[in-house]
Image (cartoon, rainbow, N blue to C red):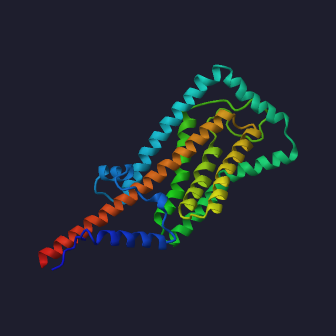
Amino acid sequence: MGSAVPTPDQEPHQAHRHDSDLRKDRWAVPLLEARPGGPAERFARAVGRTHPVLVFLAAILAGFAAIACLSIATGGLVTRILVHAWGVGAADERVEVWLAAHRVAWRTDASLIGSIMAGGVALPILVGTILVVCLLLRRWRIAAFVVFALIVESASYRATTLVIHRHRPRVVRLEHLPVNASYPSGHTAASIAVYGGLVLLLTSITRNRVFRVLAWTLAVAIPMFVALSRMYRGMHHPLDVAGGALVGIAALMVVVFACRAAGAAAGMRREHEQRREVTVGAGEA
């Protein structure tokens, strides 16, 4: 009876075949694949032999807690120290006064577009559409990545605003929102988490240099446009949008890690089942 364990001269061939299969799969996303022996795989092993969904949720919850703590700590640094020292707070406010003094109709219209792009209507519709498509195509990890990027960002933002209270810029504001929820900018965070996340996925599956340059240009330009729009409309200071950028980037890092850990857990479960089948087959033989 032949051995189920590949011999050394077979392993390179099998590895080459595996790489070819990945290249043929247009839906393969290297970004979401755990590096052998890397942090995501170690996390999956530490959690134990559990369902990949549970590993994913464990990583998400741990990551959310870390982001919330980091964002609240940073918010405390901003509101209790920075804005009261070295003229930082005055400079933060002067930017808003200058923007408000230079409002014109077309800029106001553009700022509304920037706000809508990262608002509570446009992003859920975009994410929901991607979710439906991914579910129909049975691309679970891509669906989880897109959905939880927005969920982790939103939850971290809400947790921060519950603790950190900063007054919005003292200019005429173009929107009616709570005046003490200036830090951080949720729109900026959401634009990075969603649009930046989509660019991460797309550039992970293509090597076309022109496409990658254009995609990353958009990944930088859209959050910058959103951040400037929120400041122009008198809703956030520069430090607030910087705090939002921190939350958005951290949310992406957490969701990438969680998807990789879930993938590593799924791979370990498959290996365990294959070894058990081999053991059972050997016993029956």
Question: How far across and down, in percent of the image, does residue 212 sit?
Answer: 62, 59
Describe residue 27's horizontal placement relative to residue 191 as left or right.
left
Question: How far across and down, in percent of the image, does residue 42 sit?
Answer: 33, 50
- The vertical placement of 265 against 284, above or below, is above
Quarter of the picture containing the N terminus is: bottom left
- The vertical placement of 84 against 17, above or below, is above
Task: Give the camera-side residue of 16 and 56.
Answer: 16
Residue drawn where x is 50% and y is 39% of the image: 68
Residue 146 appears in the figure: yes
Residue 181 appears in the figure: no
Residue drawn where x is 51% and y is 31% of the image: 73
Task: Give the camera-side residue of 21 and 222.
Answer: 21
Describe residue 146's horizontal placement relative to residue 92 as left or right.
left
Please state the total of marks drawn on the protein image.
0
Describe residue 273's horizontal placement relative to residue 181 as left or right.
left
- The vertical placement of 188 against 202, above or below, is above
Residue drawn where x is 25% and y is 64% of the image: 272
Q: In the current view of this chain or complex, which residue is farthest to the right?
A: 105
Quarter of the picture containing the C terminus is: bottom left
- The vertical placement of 256 against 13, above or below, is above
Question: How far across and down, in percent of the image, does residue 6 sit?
Answer: 25, 71
Question: How far across and down, in percent of the image, does residue 81 sit?
Answer: 59, 22
Residue drawn where x is 60% and y is 37% of the image: 243
Task: Give the camera-side residue of 165 and 190.
Answer: 190
